[in-house]
Image (cartoon, grey):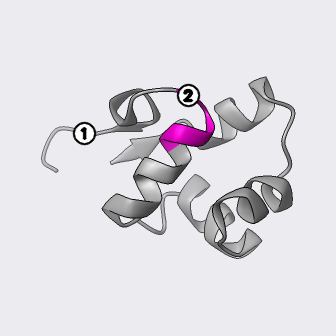
Amino acid sequence: MTNRIKVERAIHSLTQEELAKRISVSRQTINAMEANKYVPSTVLALKIAREFSKPVEEIFILEEGD
């Protein structure tokens, strides 16, 4: 799975730290998700999607073989 978190942060002019505070996680968690080293829980994915006012499927993309 890949994601568009970094792109969405740029569109909304948010730092990793700012996004992390808004969804109650650490900046390191945001960094790990952006680097595709961490797959978020359903709750966390929904919080991120809500923060960007987009459906989950527009933020998180399943790849072939997932």
Numbered label attached to residue 1: none
Q: In x, y percent, where is residue 13? A: 87, 32
Q: Residue at x 52, y 39 (%)?
A: 50
Q: Which residue is situated farthest in the left direction here?
A: 65
The segment highlighted magenta reads 49-53
Q: Residue at x 39, y 28 (%)?
A: 55
Kindly state the secondary structure of the residue where label 1 is placed.
loop
The quarter holding residue 8 reads top right
Numbered label attached to residue 53: 2
* Residue type of the residue flagged with mark 2: Ser
Q: Does residue 22 lie above or below 7 as drawn?
A: below
Q: In x, y percent, where is residue 37? A: 48, 67
Of residue 36 and residue 55, the one placed in the foreground of this image is 55
Q: Does residue 45 lie above or below 39 as drawn?
A: above
How much space separates mark 1 and mark 2, taking CA atoms?
23 Å
Q: Residue at x 67, y 41 (%)?
A: 6
Q: Residue at x 61, y 41 (%)?
A: 51
Determine crowd level at label 2: few under 14, some 14-19, many 20+ residues with C-alpha closer than 10 A: few
Determine crowd level at label 1: few under 14, some 14-19, many 20+ residues with C-alpha closer than 10 A: few
Of residue 38 and residue 24, the one placed in the foreground of this image is 24
Q: Earlier in the sequence, mark 1 or mark 2?
A: 2
Kindly state the secondary structure of the residue where label 2 is placed.
loop
Q: Does residue 12 lie above or below 35 as drawn?
A: above
Q: In x, y percent, where is residue 32? A: 59, 67
Contact between marks 1 and 2 (CB within 8 A): the answer is no
Is 4 covered by the magenta stretch? no
The quarter holding residue 58 reads top left
Where is mark 1, residue-wise?
A: 63
* Residue type of the residue flagged with mark 1: Glu
Q: Of helix, strand and loop, which mostly describes the magenta segment?
A: helix
Of residue 10 and residue 1, the one placed in the foreground of this image is 10
Query: Which numbered mark, 1 or 2, is in the foreground of this view?
Result: 2
